[in-house]
Each structure stands twice: as structure tokens, then as C-alpha cells.
Amino acid sequence: MFRSASDIVRINRRESTSINGDELYGCEFCSEGGWSSETEVEIHKSAKHKKELKSILNEADYVCGICVKEFDNGNELLKHIKTDHLYSSENAYRVEREIFVCDDCCQLFFNKLHLIVHIKQNHGSDNYKTEIVECPQCHDKFKRKQIWLHTHTHNIQSISSCRLCFIKLPNRRELKEHLDRHGHYFKCDMCGYNSKKSYLFNQHVKDNHKKKNSDVKKFKKVKKYFIPREDVLEGKGQILMIFRGVYLSNLVKICVMCREICVGYRQMCDHITHDHNTSIEMVKHEYRCVCGEVFNNKVLLKHHVFKMKGDHSIPKAGDE
């Protein structure tokens, strides 16, 4: 199992395109190739072509800041981010998967156990010997210091591993076909409504959570309703790592209340203004943190508690 570019055995891609019928992959920047997986290509590029990748990031008009892939226009770039990085339809209004967000670095995950492993590996304590984590693929439990080697047995580090169930697919093309079998996730985090159809879910949001005549002056803190937060740097061509999630870039933001995808501050303002009325005087129920701050729905309260930690928590029944 390779761990870096130096561990990969290279075959010139001009000499061969297949071995025993298996598809081979080559580097788009040089003549090297003959690799059996797309992951090996990405590791090669990150090790040998940092200059070229940096040049694309800095000079190309429409380039994905997550995987450094160029596109002809902004529309195609956004479709790519939605399908390849957010596991949703190319014309999706919102992320069509259940998402889990690391509060420290705002990386996005589609599997709760994957987020837990990430937090303990990257933001946890130094207690490696006794802390136990659960493998997101097989659900076996291991000491934290052992989980890195264990995940290699599942090929979780592969570019073409499903980030929902961690099954390893031969390539990214077959990964997209596999994702369709999972079905989409249309559950309203504001009220619990769920549906198997996107148009029914969108209609639900429109009928139940879209408020008319909202006063834009009430939304001076629009950015607090979106991830990633303003204080977290966006992704810039991050190399693949086992416990890394999606590090959003290209000004793409996701609403914490309904998972709507917005690009840029103007879209964020329009979405909050027209789709969510958060003024306290217009809501029927208040959700209050023990610190005293008030929210109009449970999603924002939970997000606040998870972010602030410490003395912040949701009051128990009877304590309010």
C-alpha cells in the first residue's frame, strides 16, 4: 500500500494503456503514467507538479479550488462542485446528502463516524493510547493510534471511495453511478419533514419556511447562517488525506438551516432575506441556549452550542 509518491511504481503511459484488461491512468502534465488508480495520479501531481497546480489556481479564470480542475465557465464549475464534491445533482439547489461539519476547520463530511475520526485525529487530545474510535466502514473499534493503518485495509484513502459508505469503486466514473443507489437525502432540519422527491421538498420549504416581505435590515449578520465560516480559509488544491473532508472553495457557502448552496455574499443575503425570516418577534417559539442567546429554530441553537462548546448547552426539559 502506497503512502506517498515515492512508493508508486511507474510505467510510461505511452507504452501501455491496460494490464490484464484493467484500466490505467496517466498524468496530464507529463508522460508518466500506467498507474492502476486515479489516486496514484493525484499523489504524483501533488509531489511532482506543485508549480503547475499553483499556476492554475492563481491564473485560471474558472478552476475548482478543491481539486484544481479547469472549466470553461462558472456554470460548469459550479455543476462540478455540486456533483463531484457535494454528492448532489448538477442542478441541485441544496446539498442532497446529510452533512456533518467540523466546527474547528469547517470541513464537510457525509458520514458521522468519518467526522468523529477526523476530529479525534486532527483536533483531539494527545491521549492516543486509550481513546477509542470506530471505523466508518466496518464499524469495528480501535485505539486511535491504530485507526490510520486499519483504514488502509479498506482503501478509504482512495479518490474513488464512497464518502457515504466507504466502499471502494474502480474509478470516479463508477463512483458517480454508485452514489445514485444511495438515494438522495431530503429531510428538513427545521421541522423534521422528509421526502424522497426533491420537488416535494423544495415545495415544502417554499410553503412552510419561506417568509415574504422580510426586512433585509434584520439580517446584518448573514454570514453566521452559512458554512464555512468567514474565519476559516477556503480550500486551495488540498492533497488527498484519509481523514479529510470537503474543504469548500470558490465562494461556495451552505446554509446551516436548509443546506441551500449559495455562491457569494449577494446570494447569501437573498437566500436569508427571502427564505428565512429570523426576527424574534415573528416566531412562535424561542430556542434558548443556557447562555441566554435566543434562536428561532433548533438547527441554529445546535450549531451555536457545537461551535461555542464550554458552558453553552441546550436546556433540559423543565429547565427553560
Image (spheres, rainbow, N blue to C red):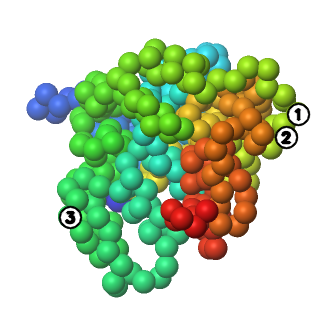
Residue corresponding to mark 2: 220
Mark earlier in primary sequence (1, 3): 3
Q: Nearer the viewer, residue 302 or 184?
A: 302
Q: Nearer the viewer, residue 55 or 287?
A: 287
Q: Nearer the viewer, residue 160 or 217?
A: 217
* Quadrant in the picture for residue 293: bottom right
Report the residue at 79% width, 20% height from top: 213
Up/down of 86 relative to 100, above or below: above
Residue corresponding to mark 1: 217
Query: For the residue marked with disc 1, what is the amino acid?
Result: Lys
* Quadrant in the picture for residue 148: bottom left
Query: For the residue marked with disc 2, what is the amino acid?
Result: Lys
Query: For the residue marked with disc 3, what is the amino acid?
Result: Asp
Residue corresponding to mark 3: 140
The kind of secondary structure element at disc 3 is loop
Report the residue at 27% width, 60% height from top: 135
Residue 212 visible in the displayed image: yes
Report the residue at 57% width, 46% height from top: 299
Mark earlier in primary sequence (2, 3): 3
- Asked whether the residues under the numbered discs 1 and 2 touch, taking CB atoms below 8 Å apart as contact, a structural biologist would say yes
The kind of secondary structure element at disc 1 is helix
- Dot 2 crowding, Cα within 10 Å, few <14, some 14–19, many 20+: few
What residue occupies the far right of the structure in this picture?
217
Mark 1 against mark 3, which lies toward the viewer? 1
